[in-house]
Image: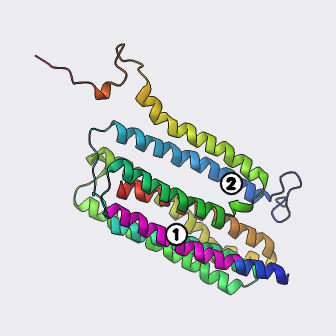
Amino acid sequence: MNIPYTVEERPDTGLTNGKLGIWLFLASEVMLFGALFSTYIILRTGAPEWPHGELNVWLGMANTFILIGSSVTMVMAWAYLKLNDFSKHRLYLLATLVLSAAFLVNKYFEYADHYRRGELPSHSTFLAIYYTLTGLHGLHIIGGMVVMAYFLGPGAKMWKKNPDQFTNRIETTGLYWHFVDLVWIFLFPVLYLL
Amino acid sequence: MHSDHESIRKSMRTYLMVGAALFVFTGITVAVNQVHLAVPAAITVALIIATMKGSMVASIFMHLSHERRWIYGALILTVLGFLVLMTVPMLTQMDSIGTPTGVANPSHSEPPVHH
């Protein structure tokens, strides 16, 4: 049985099922991260003092540049599919995957440095919420990388069979990836600068 | 098909320009942080810039500037839910449940003195 409305739009919504589905998923993600941001505000306003300068701003800034760069390469990967240029699409998707791996490597060095100094989540309220927010965000990065790796590997076969559906899948992946970037755009100032 | 390709190529130039603008805004955020403003001013500036950057990602990269009304409908509900979540911290500051009458926020009261 074929899944309906993967390429053509549903007459009632004007959208493919995949696109409506990813937006509903992203709506639930806004609630998840919103609840954690709300928790952060409660913890911060209730704390007698809040640490400043505990995190390396330059590493955080580097990761912001990396994620913004990966968002640009992701949207370019989708745009090249629209131009029927599969090889350039693969190049940009691979660049996105490499940039996301660079983000995680950077994060690993940050975590390792905290670990060496004994700064674990139990050390302070700030570090507890820092690890929760960045850890959950990191899991989202890993999730996105798995999907991108699939589309660079076995999932790429669909381009020959059904290019329109493949393009829609990459668009859906891109929407998820831009959301992950968007969350970091708020995490960076909240955790590293304020 | 030709005009389709032309509009995609035009969009690609926009994506690159938006990416460059996001880099610049990130630099500005960090530069403002180095000035060491007062905490309320620093929070305001950082969140305004982050909101501008977020809007650019959502409207251009996620194509929200020209989407279908079903997506806008779902997002309006999401924004309402998000605003409720953001008012929760305010409610916790204002409520006086479980505190003696006249003490609105026990976190600001003097600690009890033990003799």
Residue B93 in the image, given as x and y percentages of width and height: 41, 30
Q: Up-down: is A75 above or below A117?
A: below
The residue positioned 53% from the left and 39% from the top of the image is B85
Q: Residue at (36%, 18%) from the top-left corner?
A: B99
Tag 1 secondary structure: helix
Numbered disc 1: what chain? B
Q: Is residue A130 left or right of residue A169?
A: left
Q: Residue at 52% x, 45% y: name it.
A: A34
The answer to whether B50 appears left or right of B113 in the picture is right
Task: In the rendered view, tell whether residue A128 sits above or below residue A10.
Answer: above
Q: Disc 1 residue type?
A: Leu
Residue B94 lies in quadrant: top left
Of residue B41 and residue A190, the one placed in the foreground of this image is B41
Circle 1 is placed at which residue position?
B22
Q: Which residues are magenta?
A: B11-34
Residue carrying label 2: A23
Mainly helix, strand or loop, the magenta region? helix
